[in-house]
Amino acid sequence: MTSVTQTLSQSVVVFSKNYLPISRINLRRAIVLLVAGKAEPVDFFGENGWEVRSPSLIFQVPAHIRLTTNSAERVWKIPPVNRREVLRRDLHTCQYCGSKKKLTLDHVIPRSKGGKHRWDNVVTACERCNAKKGDRVLGQVGMKLQTRPKAPPHPAVAFAEQFWREQQANLD
């Protein structure tokens, strides 16, 4: 038998009014949204969800809910290019050799050669690869990037992509 705390910590996927998966919330928050009329149950995959009992009623909480209110989209700004964010984007992995040790940041096109300090020009590099590349462009040293650097996506878009990948994996 599961405890009340374990049950209420289960997660529910929240969809926007346009059925874009936005985030995961705990069961308690989902109940509040459903009771307040700000969300409605959605049954995409025939999942039952959870049954929550109180002394006076039994409440069915689905695994997926859809917001019914038109909330203004929060303005999301691309985070500044800094060490923490670049390491997170690159999964703490050197973008030249794949090492996860002694990581630094590298400008793909060196600043001395006109390269900017922007998301599409800064990557994670281990000390060894950074020293090997030095103040030169990739073609001069015969090195290649494992992934093309780019700014991080909007959190809702990243969550939606992850959600649909998980659903596809569950179907396979």
Image (tube, helix red, strand yellow):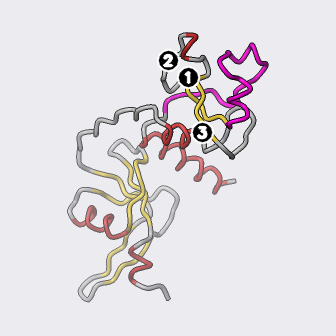
Local packing at callout 3 (Cα closer than 10 Å; few below 14, some 14-19, many 20+) is: some
Residue 53 sits above or below residue 123 on the image: below
Residue shown at 30% from the left, 51% from the top? 67
Q: Amino acid at mark 3?
A: Asp
Instruction: Describe the element under mark 2 as helix, strand or loop.
Output: loop
Q: Along the line of sight, which residue is nearer the eye, 53 or 8? A: 8
Instruction: Describe the element under mark 3 as helix, strand or loop.
Output: loop
State the CA–CA distance, disc 2 to disc 1: 7 Å
Along the polypeptide, which appears first: circle 2 or circle 3?
3
| Residue 6, position as x, y percentages in the image | 44, 79
Using the image, tell me which numbered label, if any, was put on residue 121.
1
Residue 115 sits above or below residue 42 on the image: above
136 is within the stretch colored magenta = yes
Q: Which residue is mark 2?
A: 116
| Contact check, label 2 and label 1, Cβ < 8 Å | yes
Instruction: Farthest residue to the left: give it.
Output: 36
Q: Quadrant of residue 55?
A: bottom left
Local packing at callout 2 (Cα closer than 10 Å; few below 14, some 14-19, many 20+) is: some
State the CA–CA distance, disc 3 to disc 1: 13 Å
| Residue 117, position as x, y percentages in the image | 48, 22
Residue shown at 40% from the left, 45% from the top? 19
Instruction: Describe the element under mark 1 as helix, strand or loop.
Output: loop
Using the image, tell me which numbered label, if any, was put on residue 90.
3
16 horizontally vs 82: left or right? left
Q: Quadrant of residue 171?
A: bottom right
Using the image, tell me which numbered label, if any, was put on residue 92.
none
- Range of residues picked out in magenta: 126-151
Local packing at callout 1 (Cα closer than 10 Å; few below 14, some 14-19, many 20+) is: some
Q: Along the line of sight, which residue is nearer the eye, 99 or 113? A: 113
Q: Amino acid at mark 2?
A: Lys
State the CA–CA distance, disc 2 to disc 3: 18 Å
